[in-house]
Image (cartoon, rainbow, N blue to C red):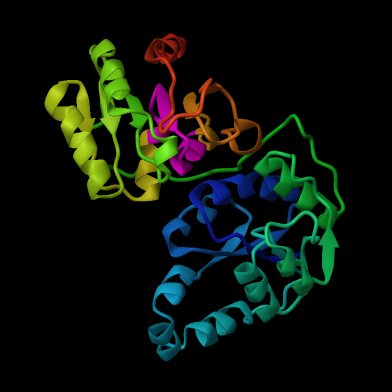
Amino acid sequence: MKILLIKMSSLGDVIHTLPALSDAQKIIPSIQFDWVVEPAFSEIPAWHPVVNKIIPVNLRYFKKHPIEALKKKFIFDLYQQINQTNYDLIIDAQGLLKSAVIAKLAKGVRCGYDKNSIKEKWASYFYDQKYTVSKELHAISRIRELFSKILNHDFEKNKLDYGINFNQTKQLEIHLPKKYIVFLHATTWPTKHYSEKNWEILLKRLNNIPILLPWGNFTEKLRAENFTKKFSNAILLPKLTIAEMAFVLKNACVVVAVDTGLGHLSAALLTPTISLYGPTDPKKVGTVGENQVHLVAATQTDQVNIDPEHILEKIKNFI
């Protein structure tokens, strides 16, 4: 069976989709997926054994530069790519108008959420088969249930398999300490941030173990550099690919993360992860996996307000 899967972004959403592929593989061992995904996250689908082909689609570029994209035959090239195969099924796991339009371009039976289950109601009118899935479920459970209804199989709700298999032998250009913690201090929403003052308290109290600090943009790098100037155990990482970041996360003894996609990657790699939540509900979008700790702020402020001492107590369980 050949399926075209559309799940383009974000990092967390892409990772949330992997367990549904593992469920499908258990029922249909020969199943193959071609996956339409944003280029920024195109490394991840390749880590699952049932993914045959990755089709990068840069809709962000199209949105920002529509005239340029049309000149470069953006839509035509995408149409050509997804029509090289006649698919048994097309699954739009994104549930947005933009993903539904891509599903419409492909050949095969188009499947997705019904109008009461989907993110953008009008997207459901592009599907041939529509399925009801509760919005109250965790994002991972929603996708697993969607797949189970489309493929007509059951899945074990209490067992989760991300199916990740990536090459850990690749050498990084940096030397990783034998034992270290990773602080995922960066996120997009201002209200999801943990204050620099609290990060510094953690760095000071954990001065006997290296703390690795990744970054993704100039602002995040400046914050991490500021930490390294104040604390000898703080180590600034170079700019890493997602695969390189996965290597770092996989080998950490524990990760402390704000609500960010890399936190979900850490969970998928079975690394103990302490995730800090404020405005978002971990019951619906929290990390899922072994050794996952969710700490939720008691009150909503401009940043995540959690006592560093509470975090330190949890860290001690893993080091």
Q: Residue at x 77, y 54 (%)?
A: 117
- Residue 175 image offset from top left, x and y in percent: 22, 33
Span highlighted in magenta in the image = 249-266
In-front residue for pair 82/69: 69
- Residue 234 image offset from top left, x and y in percent: 21, 26
In-front residue for pair 217/240: 217
User: In the image, is residue 202 above or below residue 87?
Assistant: above
In the image, residue 29 lies in the stretch drawn in magenta: no
Q: Residue 92: name its quadrant.
A: bottom right
In the image: residue 118, left or right of residue 12: right
The residue at the far right in this view is: 152
- Residue 25 image offset from top left, x and y in percent: 72, 50
User: In the image, is residue 92 above or below residue 50?
Assistant: below
Q: How many marks?
A: 0
Q: Residue at x 80, y 49 (%)?
A: 133
The residue at the far left in this view is: 229
- Residue 233 image offset from top left, x and y in percent: 20, 21
Report if residue 151 is visible in the image: yes
In-front residue for pair 115/207: 115
The residue at the far bottom in this view is: 71
Q: Quadrant of the N terminus?
A: bottom right
Q: Quadrant of the C terminus?
A: top left
Q: Residue at x 56, y 36 (%)?
A: 280
Report if residue 173 is visible in the image: no
In-front residue for pair 143/19: 143
Q: Residue at x 40, y 46 (%)?
A: 188
In the image: residue 247, left or right of residue 289: left
Q: Residue 302: name its quadrant.
A: top left
